[in-house]
Every structure is written in C-alpha cells, then in structure tokens.
Image (cartoon, rainbow, N blue to C red):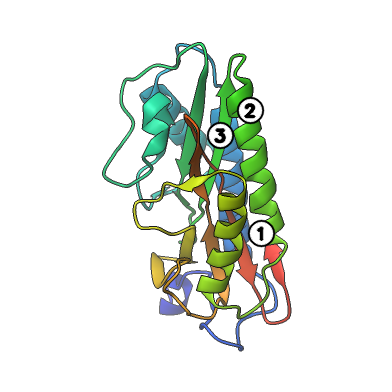
Amino acid sequence: MPASSMKPAWGYRPGPDVAFEAPQGLRAAQRLAKAAALSAVAAARAGIAENEVEEQVHSYFRQHGATGIWTITNVGLGENTRVCFPTQGPSDKRAAEQDVLMVDVHPITADGSWGDCTRCAVIGDYPEAAQALGDLERIHYETLALCRPGMPANELFGLSHERLTREGFILLDALGNIGHSLTAGAAYTHGFIDAGNATPMWGAWAIEPFAQRGEVAVKVEDVVWFGRDGCEIL
C-alpha cells in the first residue's frame, strides 16, 4: 500500500494558508458525532443509566463505521453533569424523574478524522433545566456567529464568557476554557479557548461552553472550521 494512502484526510497547516473549506473527512466525522449524540439524548428517560447511554453511543458508532474513540464518552446525570473530564467515565447512576442528561462523544472514522459533539436533554417536567439549556444553546450559537478566521482564541472566550456571566451562568470547565483546537490524530495542539491563549484560530476548533446556573449544569458543543475567508459550523 503506498505510504500516501495512510495519511489522514486532514491536510492543513495553521495560518492564513488554511483551506477555504473543511476537509471531507472532518465533515463526515462531525456528522457521525452529532448523530450519535442526538441518538443518545433521544433515549433520555427516568431510570436510564449512564453506562446504558454509553453503550448506546458505542453501538451507534459500530453500526455507522467508526473505528474507535479518541477519548472516553462522557455521560452525566444529576450531580455528574457538573463534571465532564476524561478521568470520570460513565457510572451505573440512573436518571431521576427530573434530571438532565449530558452526552459528549468523540468518534474516529476510518480515514483517521476525529469528531467531537456534546448534547443535553431534560428529563421530566423540569422548567428550570429547560430554561437553562435553552439559554446556554442560544448564547452558544450567538457566540459562534461572531467567529471570524484568525481571531485570537482568548477573544472568542471573552465574547462567550461575558454572555454567560451576564445571564447568571458560572463556567464549570476544570481548565477554565470553552473549547480547544482539533486535528486528525490530536486535540489541544494549539491550546484551549481560554483567557490566556492568544493563538489565532485557523482550521478546526471544538467550542463547548459548560456552565451551571442555580442547580442546573448544561453543556453544548459544535466544531467550527476557521477557513481562509470564513467560518462554518460543521
């Protein structure tokens, strides 16, 4: 097999010479990530366990051609929605009658591309949680609309954090960020979207505000392609 056939689909270097459009491999990986996350939260119901949701995600990946995951599948219910980190995997905790389910998925596709997506669902009649999730999603997509090629990561952090704080949210991320760079075969290469990282944003970045308001913790995540002349939510 020619060596060139083993190269990942990801073919860009950070900087203004980045491709105009996202690689097809990345697009496919992100479609898979979003579909798997949505299939998981669609199963949200009282009594379902975190590890059952994890198995549903992994079954979906196997059925749709994923070759693996690049970090654990995060699943949180109740107080476990307040932690989303690779050291805390899903447990046998079951959903209450009023609860929030958080699912963060990380597929690898056959060509070596990586996806990353988080979705949440409210279980039962829980108006406070429904409002918090709706508000976080609105802030998230308003922030994504402000993305521009090459903007400093800390500028995007500031735009998001200001909106979150104004609406009563407290950032929960253990490292104090709202996302990270993403490439085929590696994440975090160009750092995190936090207050101290002035790295220009080119290529793919996962943007994932994770925040709490009152007793409710919620998170949403999408990948944005920072192309040469525009940004696209994948």
Residue 136 lies, with reference to residue 141, above or below; the image says above
Q: Does residue 211 appear in this view?
A: yes
Asked whether the residues under the numbered discs 3 and 2 touch, taking CB atoms below 8 Å apart as contact, a structural biologist would say no
Query: As drawn, which residue projects farthest toward the left?
Result: 87
Work out how far the residue at label 1 is from the one at label 3, CA to CA, in angstroms: 18 Å
Where's residue 28, x and y in %?
A: 61, 55
Q: Mark 1 points at which residue?
A: 143
Q: Nearer the viewer, mark 3 or mark 2?
A: 2
Identity, as a three-letter code, of the amino acid under mark 1: Thr
Kindly identify the amino acid type of the residue bearing the numbered disc 2: Ala
Instruction: Report whether 99 appears left or right of 222.
Output: left
Residue at screen point 31% across, 47% down: 86
Label drawn at residue 120? 3
**Secondary structure category for the residue under label 1:** helix
- Indicate which disc residue 62 carries: none
Residue 107 image offset from top left, x and y in percent: 46, 49
Q: Residues within 10 Å of mark 1 (few under 14, many from 20)?
A: some
Labelled disc at residue 130 = 2
| Mark in front: 1 vs 3 | 1
Q: Count residues near mark 3 (Cα–Cα under 10 Å), then give few for <14, some for 14-19, many for 20+.
A: many
- Looking at the image, is mark 3 or mark 2 earlier in the sequence? 3
Is there CB contact under 8 Å for labels 1 and 2? no
Is disc 2 surrounded by few (<14), some (14 to 19) or many (20+) residues within 10 Å?
Answer: some
Which residue appears at 72% of the width and 62% of the height? 145
- Name the residue rendered at 38%, 28% in the picture: 79
Separation of residues labelled 1 and 2 (CA atoms): 20 Å
Please state which amino acid type lies under the numbered disc 3. Cys
Residue 52, picture quadrant: top left
In the image, is residue 176 above or below residue 53? below
